[in-house]
Amino acid sequence: MAQNMLKRTDELVLNIQREGQMSIFDFMSDVSTDSSGKQTTIYDVKKKLCSYLQNYKGEVHLNKLLAEFYGHYGLIGYINMVNDALKELEADGFIQICRQPQFSEKTGQPLRFMEEKGGHSVIIRRLQS
C-alpha cells in the first residue's frame, strides 16, 4: 500500500510541478523524490533503518518492520529501495535476514525473496547495536 501511495504522489504532484518534464533522478533507482521535491538516497534510508532497528531487541517480521518504519518516517522511498538498504545492512553484518523457506525445492538454491506472502516469511534479526 505504501508503494502505491508513493507512486500516486509522484504521478499527481511531481509531474504536475514539472509540467510532465522528466528529471534525471527518474532514471536512478537509488534516489526517491517526495512531493515537496526532497530527494532521498539509499544511504539516507540505510541510516534511518539502522537507527530504527534499535527499537527491536531481537527479531521482527519484515511486514511489521516496514509498516512501522513507514509509519514513523513516512513514504521516504520505494519498497525496493528499503529492501536494497536491508540487503546492504545484511552485507555489512548489522542484521541477518532469515527466510522461510530458505531454499528452493526445485533447485536447492538459496531463496532471495523480500515479501511475506503465500507461505513465505522474512524475519530480520539485529546483530549489532
Image (cartoon, rainbow, N blue to C red):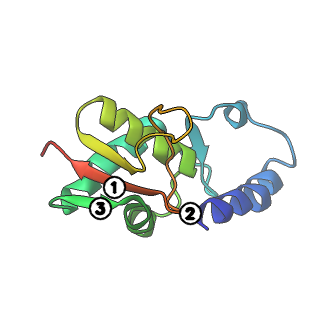
Q: Nearer the viewer, residue 29 or 121?
A: 121
**Quick one: label 3, few (<14), some, or many (20+) residues within 10 Å?**
some
Query: SS at mark 1?
Result: strand
> Total of numbered circles in the picture?
3
The location of residue 107, given as percent across then percent down, is 54, 32
| Residue 87 found in image quarter | top left
Query: SS at mark 2?
Result: loop
**Mark 3, residue position:** 60
The location of residue 74, given as percent across then percent down, is 48, 64
**Mark 1, residue position:** 123
Evaluate if marks 1 and 3 touch, with contact meaning CB atoms under 8 Å apart: yes
Q: Earlier in the sequence, mark 1 or mark 3?
A: 3
**Quick one: label 2, few (<14), some, or many (20+) residues within 10 Å?**
few
- Give the CA separation, mark 1 to mark 3: 6 Å
Q: What residue sits 48% from the left and 39% below the top?
A: 112
Q: Which mark is residue 118?
A: 2
Q: Earlier in the sequence, mark 2 or mark 1?
A: 2
Q: Is residue 46 left or right of residue 115?
A: left
Q: What residue sits 31% from the left and 52% below the top?
A: 124
Name the kind of residue labelled 1 in the image: Ile
Where is the N terminus found, in terms of image quarters? bottom right
Between tags 3 and 2, which lies in front? 2
Q: Nearer the viewer, residue 93 or 38?
A: 93
Q: Is residue 81 left or right of residue 128?
A: right
Residue 9 in the image: above or below residue 112: below
Name, please, the residue furthest toward the right.
20
Name the kind of residue labelled 3 in the image: Val
Residue 127 in the image: above or below residue 3: above
